[in-house]
Each structure stands twice: as C-alpha cells, then as structure tokens.
Amino acid sequence: MKNIQLKRVQEANVKNKFVLVRADFNVPLKDNKILDDSRIRAALPTIEYLLKNNACVILMSHLGRPDGKFVDSLRMDPVAVRLSELLKKPVHKLDDCIGPEIENDLNSLKYGDVALLENLRFYSEEESNDPLFARSLADCADLYVDDAFGAVHRAHASITGVTKYLPSYAGLLVQKEVENLSRLFEPEHPFTAIIGGAKTDKLGLIEDLLKTVDYLIIGGLLGNAVLKAHGEKIQVDIDEKTLLGVNKFCNSKKLVLPVDFAMDKGIASAKDIGPKTIELIKDIIKKSKTIFWAGPLGVIEEKQFRKGTYEIAKAIANSKAFTVIGGGTSAEVVFDLKLEKKFSWVSTGGGASIAFVQGKSLPGLEVLQK
C-alpha cells in the first residue's frame, strides 16, 4: 500500500475517553507460560501514550486457534499478568469479551485503568466479521485504536468491523510499521532481499521484489525448488505447482542461489546452506544499502541446521544498510540471538508484512486511511 496516509492516534482527543485498542498478543505459550513477550512489549508505547493522556484502555486480542470455542489453555490470563508487570500497574482481566456482565465490569472502570478482554477467537463471529459482534465490542468505548499490525491483513470484526461504529485511528506501532516498510518501495541501492522458509507462499513476493532488487538471495524450500528447476539433484520433495511457480523467475540474473550445503553424516543436506554460500551472501550483504529478510535459510527447528541462518542474521545485524526483518520466523531468530536492537526495523507482521511489501491492499489499513 504505497503513499498511505493514516489517521493517527495523536490526532484524536483521547483525554478522559474509553479507548478500545486492538493489540496483537498472539504470543507463544507452553504450560501457560509465555515463551516470547516481544509482541506484548511492542504494544506498550501506544498503551502508555493513552494512559499518559488519562484514557481508560480496553485491550483486545486473539490468541492461538480456538476455532470459536472457549479453550482454557488459550485464555488471555498469562498475557494480563505479563502486561501488568511491564506496565507496573494492575491489568483488569475480564472473563469474556462481550455480554451484559462485561459491560458492567467495563462501566466500573475509571480513567487511567487498563482492562484486557478475553480471547476474541472464542467466538467464530470474530473471524466471520459479524456486525453484531463488532457492535458489541464497540459499545464499550468512545473511540478505537488499531495497534495490531500482525492482523491488518484480516477483515475481522475487531479489525474492520468495529470501525463502522467508532472514530478509528492507527496506534504508534502500526504507524511505525507502515513508515519503515514503506521505505522498501523506494530503496537505496544496492537493494538485497533474502527470502527463505519452509512454505511456498512467497512466490508472488519474489516476483514483485525482482522488479526492484539488485540481488534476491533465495533459500529454504523455494531455493531448493529453483535448483531443482535448473536440473540439480535435490533430495527434497517439491510439488509440481511450486516447480511451475518458480519457472516464472528461475532464470533471473538477480537470483543468488545456494552453491553448497551443510554436511549431515558426510552427505550434503539441502536442509541448510554450506560455508561457501554463507560467505557469498555475506559479501553481498557488505555492499548492500537496503536489506529485506523474510524466512530462514535452513531447517532451524533442527539445531544442526541453524548455522547458515544464524550467520546471515549476524551479518545483516552488523551491516550499515537500512535493514528490515519481515516478521515471522526471521524475527524469532533475531530475538533468539538478542540482535533486535541492531536492525533498523523488526516487523511484528509476518503475513501482513509480506502483503504490505507486495503492495497489496490490507483491510485493516484501508479503514484507517484519511
């Protein structure tokens, strides 16, 4: 979405108002414990801005895939606990997100309070963008702020539905996401994109990036698919649809493919890039002035196949280029290595970031445009 002008929360009168905030608290959990709180931390600037202006903040988010059912292991309680620690003030966790009891609970709140609604996806009406569900969410507030960039590519009740009933604005995180990702539309050259991962959903992204990049480094499943399209004997199953997809660009001179692979029990394994490929990519990174990275270059779920991805992450971090991480697994790698502060921007978006970079129309941003 090029040249998008958003209605910003700074332009709204939030003082002494009840503000409904859509955040992205879809954090990884294990045994009811949060494994990575980066998405919660990303929401803090907007929450703190609203509190500073004496608003009552009503937060809402989805968590996991409960498929329209109440699932105890996917309740928002761990998020409320962590959020309370980070804000250094109580967060009122509610047991539902709509209904008369919730209305009573919210009516008892004061300006300067923070409340967190229960998991939105306990209701199938959230994903189906049911207008009555959206209206029930909106009824508790004076205005709406969307700070969940990771969900702006979804036309859900809490993303687009509520905007029909409340004055609506972009939160500070959404603003920063748009500002930083937009720089990729007019990059400083040389512009390098590094695309990897275990999915084939980035075919369109690669086609679009090839119009503007100087180098497109491709690894992961799609990298193996291109090598296979070139006639290389790659011991990875790749479906015909993917092979047909990569045929559209596999001969581009901008592509940079793996030249070797990591060894696994004496055999070259396509699960990770080898030392020559790592050095080749590092050389390109050194001369790049803009870098966009989306997707690991190896099967990082297996420790012996992490080296390539981790080495490249460190090289990008030490680069003097404008560097953007497209969310998802790449962002997880950056946080795992504690390198997030060395990147120009680490997106919280994943799928939303990819769609934005492709120039696709995002429902959650469309409704926030001036």
Image (spheres, rainbow, N blue to C red):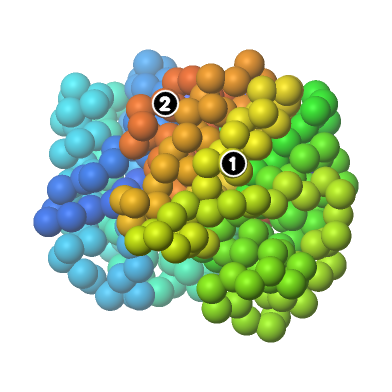
Answer whether residue 266 is visible to the viewer in this image: yes
Task: Please provide percent x and percent y for residue 25.
Answer: 35, 46
Residue 74 drawn at (x, y percent): 23, 61
In the displayed structure, does residue 280 sit left or right of residue 142? Answer: right
| Near-viewer residue (74 or 200) | 200
Residue 162, can we see it? no
Q: To which residue does mark 1 refer? A: 276
Q: Nearer the viewer, residue 296 or 224?
A: 224
Q: Quadrant of the C terminus?
A: top right
> Disc number at residue 339?
2
Q: Name the kind of residue labelled 1 in the image.
A: Lys
Crowding around mark 1 (Cα neighbors within 10 Å: few <14, some 14 to 19, many 20+) is some
Where 59 falls versus 265 (above or below)? Answer: above
Q: Is residue 338 shown above or below 293? A: above
Q: Is residue 203 left or right of residue 155?
A: right
- Callout 2 secondary element: loop
Q: Residues within 10 Å of mark 2 (few under 14, many from 20)?
A: some
The amino acid type of the residue labelled 2 equals Leu
Say above or below: 100 vs 60.
below
Q: Quadrant of the N terminus?
A: top right
Q: In the displayed orientation, state which residue is furthest to the front.
A: 266
Q: Is residue 36 above or below residue 291?
A: below
Q: Nearer the viewer, residue 325 or 263?
A: 263
Spatial distance from mark 1 to mark 2, Cα to Cα?
A: 24 Å
Residue drawn at (37%, 16%) of the image? 52
Mark in front: 1 vs 2: 1
